[in-house]
Image (spheres, rainbow, N blue to C red):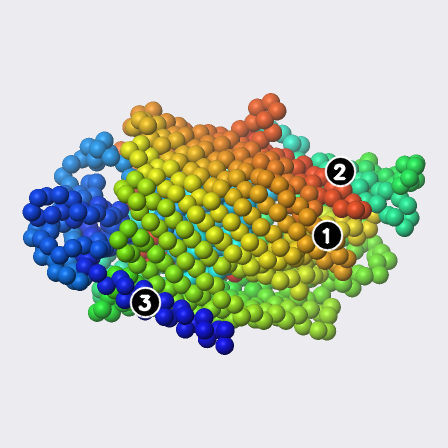
Amino acid sequence: MFFRKEIASFILFFFITSAFAQKSSFKGIVIDNQTLEPIEYASVSLVSQIDNSVVSGVITGKNGNFVIQNIQSGNYKIKIYFIGYEIQYLENILLKNNQVLNLDTFKLQRSNQSLEEVIIKGTKSNFYNKIDKQQYKADQFATANGGTAIDVIKNLPSVTVNGQGEISLRGSNGFMILVNGKPVLSDAQTLLSQLPANTIENIELITSPSAKYDPDGKGGIINIITKNNKNGIALISNLSGGLPSINDYDNLEKPKRFGGDITFNYRTKKFDITISGNYLRNDVNGYREGNVFTKNFINNTITRFPSNGERSFDKYNYGTKTAISYTANKNDVFNFGFFIGKKFQARRADIVYNNSTSDLNTNALISENAYFNSNVQTKEGTFTLTNLDYTHTFANKSNLMTSLLYENADLYGNTINKNLDLATRSIVLQEVNNPYKNPIDGFRFKLDYSIPIGLGKLESGYQYRFDQQNGKFDYIVTPISVQPDAANFRGTAKSVNHINGFYSQYSGKTNKLDYIAGLRCEYSSREVVLSTDSNPHLLKLSNLFPSANLLYTFNTYWNAKLGYSKRIQRNNNFELNPIPEREHSETLEQGDPDLKPQFVDLVELGMNHSFKKGTLFATLYYQNIKNPIQRVNSVYADTILNRVFTNAEKARLLGLEFGTNLKPVKWFSLYLGGNIYNYKITGKLNILGITSNVDNSNWAYSLNTNSTFNLDKTLSLTANINYTSAKPTAQGEDSRFLSPNLSAKKTILKGNGTIGIQWQNINFGNMGSNQQRITTFGADFYTTTNYTYETNVLLLNFSYNFNKISSKNKLPTSEIGEKEF
């Protein structure tokens, strides 16, 4: 009954909204007369034919469309203007009462002025704040050239990247990734590390997503928009290489850093064909030092095991993508894509341990032991994806789109943990291997329909998602030891997920108010089957996800927005797998098959201001989190901690984010973004059957700044700083993290080529760049580890463009497999 009432109220809301929206208005579309591509952000002014006074004005949207609403009957003319195009007028337009006048399509003619003259007259903004998102131009962050998407997004005001490479949005590790508006369920760190920064046009932060988006990701959505080109042949290539390391951490191998990507695009009015390939080797050298103790209250002892040594990464990935877009006619468009790629990562931790056991009361030494631990953890994956999309536009301007995607990922790896004698480091005292295979299959089907109603648009759709993973995990100890629970360390884990989702939303504009309101209904089922447990672990959910966004424009310079969205952070299979892995000498890792997903209510209130020299925004936001997932420690043995995933009861996050883009003079631009928030987590934690209470809260903040100096028309210098303060966790604190970077870029070959040099993670004296200390503690343990990664890294980049990359077609992107890598 409750569900029926919600749906009835929802449908009634749309009818009422549509009825009130019937007022006199103009609508139309602005496109380029040569390429027929829509022109976004063109200025459209409504002018009185009688006295030439400006009555109203708007800018065009992403599809080049515009609507001017709440206009009295009369005689008007339209003026359309965009930098680089001739101004176009439409004279003597008669508007009647309650008339919705469709002006059809305006085709703008390119101006004969030179590009240099246009640049002097004005530049396109690097930042836009819309009703449900913030949009940033990627090329303003020059220090990311030759890098990956991570190097771009870490500059945004609400995004932080810590020493472990973990990405957070508004203090949350859970968020969703889109590529050109297409959902991607893969792990953010893995996916973004494979996407070259040079191919990115814009980054959108969708902090209050509407109902048409998947509700996954408690922090919101990051949408990556790739570059586009005109008709014809386009080719872009990028090469990068690292200079020899400046700092030496006495690692076993020297890091290798080089890569390249090339994309060929052929585009006509009907076909858009893209073939691309990339290779990236990006090793990271480093060092770690830690201090741990555990208390055994039964034996009345305390065991200390401080450690120090190498922590480095060998990483590479390569792949090829093919995508074909075919426009059969103006109403029918087909997209096909295929991808195959490989990703590899090896983490080495060669650590010296100095273990000692003492009396808990007197601290009298009972025993001590020193040894060398060599630990190598490898992860590999081969990914194959294919997608097929079809879009049909009807005569009434409504659209129907269907989308199919299939993915197969062959995931496997091993952790080899060797304890060796300290003197020679050649005698194996104990070796533990954790080989595994974890292949995955995934499928997604989408059906979306949109139709203009009144002065707005009604969108509805259905989506079905399925994935299954069959994991086989082994545990081999040499020499064989007596371990009563050894059987729990090997076995199989199979998980199956089904998700059915329906949504409907209405968006429109009345006078100065833009609005979007919608509801998404989802039914999902999850089953985890374990060889170590005869009973399957089942979870079935039926949930409603409402959303609403308002944007009120006071005048040309000021607007305010209000948004609400309900989200869900689902559990991945790594979090659900209870079979322990010996990550290294002092740590086991395991999941919980009965973990609950996190449910989040997001609310935000923001103010945006634009002025002659730039833009400024500030947004106050609140998150109410149910079942927050925590990665916590417990004592497995005197010298081994067990890291497990568990749910706390609740958490809340209150924050303020702000940002500004300034260009006080034409040779200098400044971007500054920040985020300050208070995070509080409370309730009971169930750690392997043992209940404990958590009540932890604190303030945290981050600052990202980016300055560009244009020394002349071909040479620029960019400096940026990423800083994250210390922040609380369920059992402790992560320390602050600092990363300063500098880059110089020069265009050559008549503007077609670019060479650059980057100085990453700059470090002088006691700056402490690119290092972070992780501390956790409980009643019977304490652990603190400082991770120090390579600083003062120098990279050389070269890029050559025959034209720009196409984004018309949709390259397939991993939905599931990357998430489990």
Q: Horizontal placement of 98 versus 352: left or right? A: left
What kind of residue is marked 3?
A: Ile
Q: How many marks?
A: 3
Residue placed most toward the observer, 624 or 631: 624
Residue 814 vertical position relative to residue 758 in the rendered view, above or below? below
- On the image, numbered disc 3 is attached to which residue? 16
Percent of width and height locating residue 181: 39, 56
Image point (83%, 48%), residue name = 638
Q: Quadrant of residue 289?
A: top right
Q: CA distance from mark 3 to mark 2?
A: 64 Å
Say which of marks 1 and 3 sits in front.
Answer: 3
Question: 10 Å neighbourhood of mark 2: few (<14), some, or many (≥20)?
Answer: some
User: Residue 429's spot in the image, x, y percent?
Assistant: 82, 47
Q: Secondary structure at mark 3?
A: helix
Mark 1 and mark 2: span between their CA atoms?
25 Å
Q: Which residue is mark 1?
A: 693
Task: Decide which of tag 3 and tag 2 comes sooner along the chain.
Answer: 3
Residue at 34% x, 24% y is: 711
User: Which amino acid is tagged 1?
Assistant: Asn
User: Toward which corner of the image does residue 490 lie, by quadrant?
Assistant: bottom right
Residue 285 at what x, y percent from top left? Answer: 61, 37
Q: In the rendering, at what x and y percent does residue 534 appear?
A: 72, 73
Query: Is label 2 in a helix, a strand or a loop?
Result: strand
Q: Residue at x 41, y 70 (%)?
A: 9
Tell which circle, 1 or 2, labels the residue nearer the N-terminal end. Answer: 2
Q: In the image, which is nearer the foreground, mark 1 or mark 2? A: 1
Quadrant for the C terminus, please.
bottom right
Foreground mark, 3 or 2, reads: 3
Name the residue that disc number 2 marks.
291
Which image quadrant is residue 43 in? top left
